[in-house]
Amino acid sequence: MIDYHVHTPLCGHARGQPEQYVEEGVRRGLAEMGFADHFPLKALGYAPRNPVTMEPGDLPAYVENIKRAAAGAPFPVKLGVEVDYLPGKMEAAAGILEKYPFDYVIGSVHFVGTWDCTHPLERQEFQRRPLSELYRDYFELIWEACYSGLFDIMAHVDAIKKFGYRPHPEHLVPLYRKTASVLRETGICLEVNTAGLDAEARELYPSTELLRECLRQGVELTAGSDAHAPAQVARHFPQVRRMLQKEGVDRLVTFTGRQKGYYRLDGGD
Ligand code: ZN
Ligand code: FE
Ligand code: FE
Ligand code: ZN
């Protein structure tokens, strides 16, 4: 398997050096891995209530750290980054990203307005407004993010379910359909993110229903553990690999210098 969503301590809420993440990847038999730490939002003039990203001055060190870890690894280690979608700020982000040799850029939505819908200290918002509205606002940002043109991959595309708050399925169906069609239209890969299995949601990001809709519409996939500690690298991957093959998925997308390649799932372990 490939694990394309791994963090480093520079974001302030992950533990372990890049080399330790690579070691764990080797132990778990990965074919390839990619780091995607949190892009510095302060560089875009945004300072969330609860800071969750690296500082603007950290980017050169981040790139160096990953290059160093890659040099000692027995498999390809890619340089990625996870950038929060913030309306109106993505051109500025692109201007910063082009100074570094990124293999891929993962887009994610954590902020709905100024609310971080994935932050444990901000979960009370789920009791303040109807879930159908919160989900609608969240997915509209996912669609906008896709159209921003900055991203190769969308991370944990239904992360708003993290704490287990879900609206009635009738509200989800149209959101899933549109999400799949926007991903298909923009050519952005959907990340199968295993962190959801360890969150209160107890479910992959995306849900089975959303995954099936995306596959039905021809969306391509990557995989990521969203590891914030070395032990989390490739978490739940054997189970996910089997599930994907059962759903008829025979390959995952890889990236080199922002160009797509493929990793075949049927090529044995
Ligand atoms: Zn994080
Ligand atoms: Fe994220
Ligand atoms: Fe992440
Ligand atoms: Zn993430």
Image: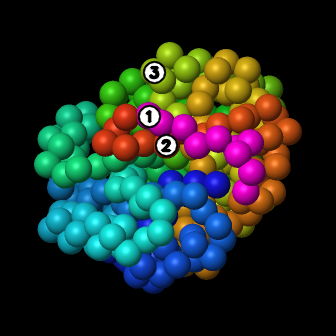
Q: Which residue is mark 2?
A: 254
Instruction: Give the distance between the C-alpha atoms of the residues marked 2 and 1, in whole angstroms.
Output: 6 Å
- Amino acid marked by disc 3: Thr
Q: Is mark 1 within 8 Å of ligand 3?
A: no
Q: How many marks?
A: 3
Q: Residue at x 53, y 25 (%)?
A: 183
Position of residue 228 relative to residue 80, above or below, is below
Q: Quadrant of residue 62?
A: bottom left
Left/right of residue 200 with respect to residue 55 in the rendered view: right
On the image, numbered disc 1 is attached to which residue? 260
Q: Is mark 3 within 8 Å of ligand 2?
A: no
Q: Label 1, label 3: how many angstroms apart (C-alpha)?
A: 14 Å
The amino acid at mark 2 is Thr
Q: Residues within 10 Å of mark 2 (few under 14, many from 20)?
A: many
- The verdict on residue 264 being magenta is yes
Q: Residues within 10 Å of mark 3 (few under 14, many from 20)?
A: some
Frontmost residue, 75 versus 132:
75
Q: Provide the secondary structure element on which disc 1 rests.
A: strand
Q: Which residue is mark 3?
A: 186
Q: Which one is in front, 200 or 36?
A: 36
Disc 2 secondary structure class:
strand
Residue flagged by tag 1: what amino acid is it? Answer: Lys
The answer to whether residue 144 is left or right of residue 196 is left
Q: Is residue 66 left or right of residue 94?
A: right
Q: Look at the numbered discs 2 and 1 and tell me whether their residues touch, using CB distance below 8 Å.
A: yes
* C-alpha gap between disc 3 and disc 2: 17 Å
Residue drawn at x 50%, y 16% is: 185
Give the x, y percent position of residue 188.
Answer: 48, 30
Task: Tell me where the magenta segment starts and ends, as one range.
Answer: 260-269
